[in-house]
Image (cartoon, grey):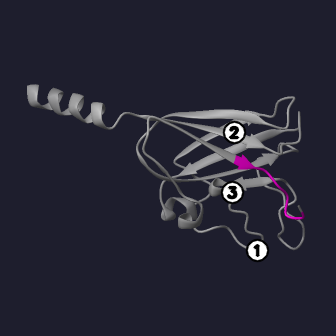
Amino acid sequence: MLHIIFYCLFFSLFNPPITLEIKMEGLIPEKGTIRIGLYNSASAFKDEANPNHAQVVSVGKNATQIIKFEGLPEGKYLVAAYQDVNGNKKIDKNILGIPTEAYAFSNNVFPKWKSPTFDEAAIKLEKPFEAIKLKFRTWID
């Protein structure tokens, strides 16, 4: 039993949980919510509806907003987000399948004709505190 406690303490000292701070820019102030998901693998990202970690936050009075994910394990993550202006809990698209609401991915990858690959947009979290920026844009920006 003592060796299990020692192992847990040793592991937590050398792999502390990570806080990821995300500064989101280019939002439409006071319109809807931001839906943001973190995916820790390519297979997890293929199932976009079920991120490993997720938050839904109301959009504030400014075009820039900061949120945090706390207690994340070390590893690679893809961050995907969109501003759900009308509150229907999905990213709206026109008849051609082109998104009409602003969206963003980590590494500021902004593909127009497909979702990015996990490797294109993944970030590596290693330090106890990490910070990234997401620039929200619409397809026509």
Q: Tag 2: residue type?
A: Lys
Percent x, y of residue 31: 88, 38
Circle 3 packing at 10 Å, graded few (<14), some (14-19), many (20+), is: some
Q: Tag 3: residue type?
A: Asn
Prevailing secondary structure class for the magenta stretch in the rendered image = loop
From the image, tell me which residue sits under label 3: 108
Gap in angstroms between the C-alphas marked 2 and 3: 12 Å
The quadrant of the picture occupied by the N terminus is top left
Q: Which residue appears farthest toward the left when viewing the image? A: 2
Task: Give SS at disc 1.
Answer: loop
Residue at 77% x, 52% y: name it: 90
**Vertical arrangement, residue 94 with respect to residue 130, above or below:** below
Gap in angstroms between the C-alphas marked 1 and 3: 15 Å
Residue at 9% x, 25% y: name it: 2
From the image, tell me which residue sits under label 2: 23
Circle 2 packing at 10 Å, graded few (<14), some (14-19), many (20+), is: some
Snapshot quadrant of residue 64: top right
**Vertical arrangement, residue 76 with respect to residue 56, above or below:** below
Bounds of the magenta span?
Answer: 134-140
Percent x, y of residue 3: 10, 30
Point out the tag, 1 or 3, that comes first from the N-terminus. Answer: 3
* The one of 80 and 19 positioned closer to us in this rendering: 19
From the image, tell me which residue sits under label 1: 113
Relative to 58, 31 lies left or right: right
Gap in angstroms between the C-alphas marked 1 and 2: 25 Å
Q: Tag 1: residue type?
A: Trp
Point out the tag, 2 or 3, that comes first from the N-terminus. Answer: 2
Point out the tag, 1 or 2, that comes first from the N-terminus. Answer: 2
Badge 2 vs badge 3, beta-carbon distance below 8 Å: no
Snapshot quadrant of residue 117: bottom right
